[in-house]
Amino acid sequence: MSTIGHSTAAQVDPAPCQLPPWPSHWLSVSTVQVPLSAQQAPAPESCAAIDDFAKSKLGAFPQGWKPRKDAGYPVYSILEEGGLRFLRAAPRGLGIQAARQLDGWNLATHPVLAWSWRPREFPKGGDERESATNDSALAVYLLVDYSRIVGPKAVKYIWSEKVPVGTRLSSNAGLTQVLVLRSGATGKDAWTDEHVNVLDDYRTFFGEPGTPKAAGIAVLTDSDDTRSSAAGDYARFRFCRAP
């Protein structure tokens, strides 16, 4: 479900981010281990950029994104290394998502979400299987329109320090289905490129055969449950046709 790959494409400008409210925190654990089979990387020409952060100001909160709470503005900022612009998340005792709304993403034609990420600091004692330690260095969400009252449905991909790859978790009363995509400190401080068929995962995890309307994406590096600190980087978000 995840392999290494690169892609470049033209930027897609989203509508202003007005995502519905996020549901309250709630966690349950599934013992099911999902086999993650390697998939062919999508061809660069089959992808369109969601955000390469070229339009965002260095040191500032990313343009076109919105934190769940105002306290999230200082958590996320744009940095640059070797010509690559990326989003740095560095919370201290906080757990606040940053989201980007996308009105032009058609999951029927472009079911693959691709991005690069890099863990810098894992939250001390973090273990996503327990509510008291449910913090991650890196998390990327597919957001799907559901309810203006309780919020969107989501498929959440995480890089966990301890939980095995393929573990499925459920949070927010089942509205968020979580999949451990990477585990452990191997690769820490190095960029890893991912591409996942979010449409296939959504259909499997929610048991819905249709094609939902994508509302956008979100990221979360959090350390509120462990009352510690964490840091992670995100770059090169794009959606792609299936290989």
Image (cartoon, grey):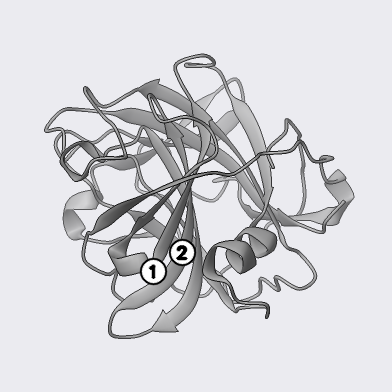
**19 shown above or below 98:** below
Q: Is residue 103 left or right of residue 89?
A: right
Q: Is residue 19 visible?
A: no
Q: Residue at x 37, y 66 (%)?
A: 174
Instruction: State the image quarter where residue 35 is shown.
Output: top right
The amino acid at mark 1 is: Leu
Q: Is residue 14 visible?
A: yes
The residue at which mark 1 appears reads as 175
SS assignment at label 2? strand
Instruction: State the image quarter where residue 190 is shown.
Output: top right
The residue at which mark 2 appears reads as 154
Counting from the top left corner in percent of width and height, residue 83 is at 62, 26
Q: Residues within 10 Å of mark 2 (few under 14, many from 20)?
A: many
Q: Nearer the viewer, residue 53 or 237?
A: 237
Q: Nearer the viewer, residue 221 or 156?
A: 156
SS assignment at label 1? loop
Counting from the top left corner in percent of width and height, residue 234 is at 50, 38
CA–CA distance in space, label 1 to label 2:
6 Å
